[in-house]
Image (cartoon, helix red, strand yellow):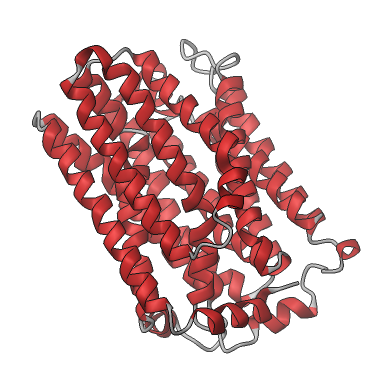
Amino acid sequence: MRARLLILASAVAMLGWGTVLPYQYAYAATTRGWGSLVAAAASSLFSVGALLAAPVGGRLADRMSPVKVAVAAKVVAAAGAASLIWAGGPVSFLVGMFVFGLGITAAGPAQSVLVLRWVGGTDRRRVFAWQFTGQALGMAVGAFGAGYVVDLDRASGMWPAFAAAAAGFLLSGVLLLAAGARRWGMPVGSAEDAALTSQGVGTASPREALRAIWAIPALRWTALITVTLALGFYAQFESGLPAYALTVLHVHETTIGLAAAVNCVVIIALQMLVVRLTAKRSGATLLMGVGAIWTLSWLVLAASSLAPELSAALFVTTFGIFAVGETMYAPVLNPLTASLAPSGLVGTTLGMFTALQTGVSAVGPLVAGVILGAGLGSLFIGLHVAISLLAVFGAWRLRAAMRPRTSSAQRRVDAELAA
């Protein structure tokens, strides 16, 4: 039951975020008249807040109750979203987006630690998969619903979305508190928390923790995979791919919305099937598959520029292919990273890897802007094919590095985190 509440909490939070994400740029740039520079800065500050919060949230999850850390982060996110209602100028709007980014991302590592602690090793992929599916569904429902209440012709037209986002994060925090209640056998701040956080974490400085993490070869390869797979798709999902579609393929704007919807539908339809079919495959092998699938996606996108009459259909197909890779990526990466983490530094490791992913994802729009702005669409495709192939290589090296320690690492993580 705790796992179900955690999945529901993730979905509700993303439902709130989905009401804001598709509209905040146009709201800041056009509705409020602050211009594209402020709108872009809002997105950048959101990413900066996320980048700063991920390692802090992860480290706090090692030091204290991850339930308390996650709930506190949800409250911060709710405060950031609510503050946007009263943002009368660009500065207050930028501050609100920064706080919003802090809260959303700080909760992530703590929630991952809770999955690892509350769910047995054989079910973790399934729960992470359900969590990812719930987030995708929540985001889609939030964006769809906001389309009926958001009015970008009025300065107050985004207030319902901001209020819904704040309410969603507060409700998510309540669900997490319910999941950690005593009736499920694990009270917040229990002895289990103390046992998990009393492994020398409190005396280790951030630099010592980083050295301990970086000393493990398999984690170094996992870091490479995290960076390349983030650059290979997630960094371009919101800006680079739509920009390529509009400037190179010259498809209609509605095609981009259709592609995003297809991406979500494929994830929801295939997630559990993929988890069942890949249950006995190693995480490194599955990440190799993700890199290969995303390489194929970019090649299909390249083909769309050679067949203008099929460009819209191939663009939508590309997003569907990307989604197949996502169904393997989401359930695998966090459990794999946790299984390789040094003793007592699971949350810290997850936080650092989340920061890596967030940081390179923030770089993606800049790369796309420079390359596509110069009219180099072929270079944009070629670069991402190379990045995806590098991810395949990194996963292949990770599989070799893990062979001597796979069984002992899994036993150790199970002992530390199993409820």
Instruction: Look at the image and tell me in which quarter the N terminus lies.
Output: bottom right
Query: In the depicted view, which residue is nearer to us: 379 or 310?
Result: 310
Look at the picture and state if 108 lies above or below 396.
above
Q: Can residue 11 be seen in this view?
A: yes
Report the side of 121 relative to 338 (left or right).
Answer: right
Image position, residue 272 (x, y; %): 62, 45
* Residue at 19% across, 38% down: 381
Query: In the depicted view, which residue is nearer to us: 43 or 328?
Result: 328
Look at the picture and state if 384 lies above or below 331.
above
Query: In the depicted view, which residue is nearer to us: 288 or 51?
Result: 288
User: Residue 390's image quarter?
Assistant: bottom left
* Residue at 38% across, 27% down: 317
Look at the picture and state if 375 lies above or below 108.
above
Q: Can residue 52 be seen in this view?
A: no
Image position, residue 189 (x, y; %): 77, 72
Report the side of 147 relative to 252 (left or right).
Answer: right
Query: In the depicted view, which residue is nearer to us: 227 or 194?
Result: 227
User: Residue 375's image quarter?
Assistant: top left
Report the side of 392 relative to 195 (left or right).
Answer: left
User: Residue 214's image quarter?
Assistant: bottom left
Q: Which residue lies furthest to the right in this view?
A: 183
